[in-house]
Amino acid sequence: MTRTLLTLLIATAASALAERPVATITSAREFTLSGVRIPATAVSSWPLTVGDVVSNLSSPAVIRFSDNTQVAVGVGSSVKLEAAEGRTLVRLTDGSLNYRAGSTQNVRVYALDQQLDKSDAGARVAGGHVRKGHRNSGDHDGREFESPGPPGKPPGRSQGE
């Protein structure tokens, strides 16, 4: 009885400390999320929290935030979600992305350590170098903000939430 109660207490504490989703990601093919392979058939949209790393994209993906900020991430790219000063940061560490700013200033987009602003169409990171302002270099399939899921769905645990 004591062991069961202790296990339940630990599980409750762990779930209380878990981060709340800040965005969702949609991709037609598999990708890696913080070291775990996510098959395309798992769910139509996967929740993302601060600290998550998305990598090994087999096809373009779209990350959507509740303020309608959308980040299109190219094949093979890697991004990390971070937090600073009450804002969510999307940091491109390899590959390419395009983005469209949402209705608030709560999401900031970076290519390595360089912040992108609303005038930037996107960025590419290769070999530790950043090229800002690129748009649809072929790896976004020309549909940078389309996704297989319902449009405008705010972040949640899954599309069925």
Image: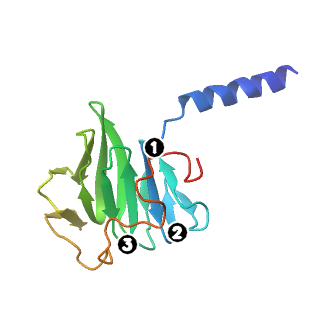
Task: Name the residue at 50% across, 49% down.
Answer: 47
Alpha carbon separation for disc pair 2 and 1: 18 Å
Position in image of residue 94 (x %, y %): 30, 63
Q: Residue 49, which numbered label?
A: 1
Position in image of residue 101 (x %, y %): 23, 51
Task: Name the residue at 54% across, 29% down.
Answer: 17
Which residue lies most toward the front here?
151
Rendered-image quadrant of the N terminus: top right
Which image quadrant for residue 16?
top right
What SS does tag 1 mark? loop
Q: Nearer the viewer, residue 17 or 68?
A: 68
Residue type indicated by callout 3? Val
Q: Residues within 10 Å of mark 3 (few under 14, many from 20)?
A: many
Vertical comparison of 10 with 46: above or below = above
Q: Are marks 2 and 3 in contact (CB under 8 Å)?
A: no
Task: Name the residue at 83% across, 24% down.
Answer: 3
Task: Name the residue at 33% across, 37% down.
Answer: 83
Alpha carbon separation for disc pair 2 and 3: 11 Å
> Quick check: 101 left or right of 58?
left
> Quick check: 160 left or right of 3?
left
Which residue does the numbered mark 2 point to in the structure image? 30
Position in image of residue 71 (x %, y %): 31, 58
What SS does tag 2 mark? loop
Residue type indicated by callout 1? Thr
Which residue does the numbered mark 3 point to in the structure image? 75
Which image quadrant for residue 122?
bottom left
What SS does tag 3 mark? loop
Position in image of residue 7 (x %, y %): 75, 28
